[in-house]
Image (cartoon, grey):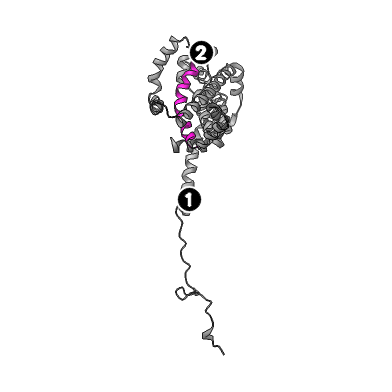
Amino acid sequence: MSTTADLPVTGAPDHEPAPTAGTAKPRRHRGRGQRSRGQTALLHTLLGIASLVAFFPVAWIVYVSLGPDKSDYLHPDKIAGKISFSNYSDVLQNTDFLKWFGNSVLIALSATLIGVLLSASAGYAVSRMKFPGHRPLMWTFLITQMFPVAILIVPLYNILAGLNLLDTYQGLVIVYLTTAIPYCAWLMKGYFDTIPVEIDEAGRVDGLSPFGTFWKLVLPLARPGLAVAAFYSFLTAWGEVAYATQFLLSSEKYTLAVGLQTFVSEHDAQWNLMAATSVMIALPAALFFYLVQRHLVTGLTAGASKS
């Protein structure tokens, strides 16, 4: 007959005694990368403050644009009682806003399409082809970004004058491309580096030419990088002021940025109309951002990790 001493022990191991009543639970340790509640609250607070700081100028411009008088910006507390959209109707009906808008769309889209195509071609060539001078070429692109606009205006003006491209859309597009292509080429080169070379080899096996491989196989995989390049090229041409002011001489070719300056004279400034025009200028840029925003983070991080 067996005794209780012969029965197997099914409880806790000898080295880990079963917890008794009143024993404190072991403290839960945070894993690597996990934040405490205090750190999370502080982070959210800082992000909220940063969001308010970034959003305040935009909200202020929109608010001022709803004041019907040009001096309402001096008394913002009085705008709430007389909010009106008269500034917007005044800009659309009594100024050349629609002409400025058309000129800006033409120049910005031209700079975007040409800039993306050339920068993607340059980035792909440097990423895949080892030709003499391919490294100096990329460093040359980078060096061109070191010079401020104030230094470049005079030589660019002389070049455009010598080519009879002053006061032309083509001349302004070329100037914008000198700014957009170097940055976008670096970006696209970094993104193409993340695409396996085996895809190019498979294209050659299938009988595609180098350009056919680039156009049919590689470019569809580079949509995030193309979206970032398009967004940068568009913003470069859409909101630029210095070059457009100096190189566009006739009023019928003004862009939005140049036309905005017509609201300021030597003795007067129509701040209400400027605010309304600024809001309408920002809307296409916001719409373009909305269309490409899902590709922006992927394109920026991939390009930055390999450039």
Q: Which of 5 and 258 is in front in this view?
A: 5
* Mark 2, residue position: 168
Q: Disc 1 marks which amino acid? A: Thr
Say whether residue 173 is magenta.
yes
Residue, far bottom: 1
Give the residue at x 52% y 85%. 6
Q: Disc 2 marks which amino acid? A: Thr
Question: For numbered disc 1, what is the local secondary structure?
Answer: helix
Q: Which of 88 and 30 is in front in this view?
A: 30
How far is mark 2 from mark 1, CA to CA?
54 Å
Q: Quadrant of residue 32?
A: bottom left
Say whether residue 199 is magenta.
no
Looking at the picture, how far across and down is residue 261, in whole percent? 49, 18
Q: Which of marks 2 and 1 is in front?
A: 2
The stretch of residues the image draws in magenta is 171-195
* Mark 1, residue position: 40
Disc 2 or 1, which lies upstream in sequence? 1
Question: For numbered disc 2, what is the local secondary structure?
Answer: loop
Q: How many marks?
A: 2
Quarter of the picture containing the C terminus is: top left
Looking at the picture, how far across and down is residue 228, in whole percent? 51, 32
Quarter of the picture containing the N terminus is: bottom right
Looking at the picture, how far across and down is residue 26, in whole percent? 46, 66
Classified by dominant secondary structure, the portion drawn in magenta counts as: helix
Looking at the picture, how far across and down is residue 169, in whole percent? 52, 15
